[in-house]
Image (cartoon, rainbow, N blue to C red):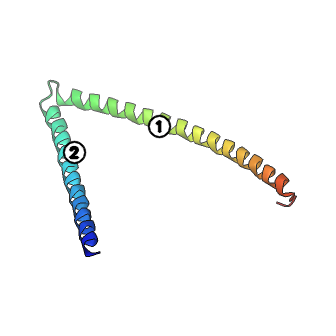
Amino acid sequence: MCENSDSNLKRDRHYKSTGKNLLGMLIIVSLSVFSGFILGLLFAPQSGLKTRKIINEKLSDVIDRGKFTFAEAKVMGEELLEKSKEKAGKVSSIIRSMTGSDTD
C-alpha cells in the first residue's frame, strides 16, 4: 500500500514539474515573440509616422472585424436560445401528455 502511495506522489511531482516547465516555456516564447515584434518595428524601413499609421489602420480593422464577429455571435446565440426554448416546450408538452398531467 505504501509503494502505491509513493508512486502516486512521484507521478504528482512529475506532472507539477511538467506544468511548471510548460509555463516557463510559454513565457519565454511569448517574450521572444513580443521582443521580435518590437525589434521589427524599430528596424522597419519606414518612418515611425508611417509605421504608426499602418498599425493604427490595422488595429482599427481588427477591432471592426471583432465587433462584427461579436454581433454575429450575439444574433446566432439569440437564435439558438429561441430554438432551444421551442424544443424545450415541445418536450415538456410531450412529457405532460405522456403523464396525463394538465397542470403546469
Task: Give residue 50's quadrant in the image.
Answer: top left
For numbered disc 2, what is the local secondary structure? helix
**Which amino acid does the dot numbered 1 rest on?**
Lys
Q: Is residue 55 left or right of residue 36?
A: right
| Residue at numbered disc 1 | 67
Residue density around tag 2, few if under 14, some if 14–19, many if 20 or more, within 10 Å: few
For this rendering, which residue is in front, 77 or 104? 104
Which residue: 54% across, 35% down?
A: 72
Q: Is residue 50 left or right of residue 79?
A: left
Position of the N terminus by quadrant: bottom left
**Which amino acid does the dot numbered 2 rest on?**
Ser
Q: Is residue 1 left or right of residue 31?
A: right
For numbered disc 1, what is the local secondary structure? helix
In the image, residue 56 sits, relative to residue 100, either above or below, namely above
Q: How many marks?
A: 2
Residue at the bottom extreme, as displayed: 2
Q: CA distance from mark 1 to mark 2?
A: 26 Å
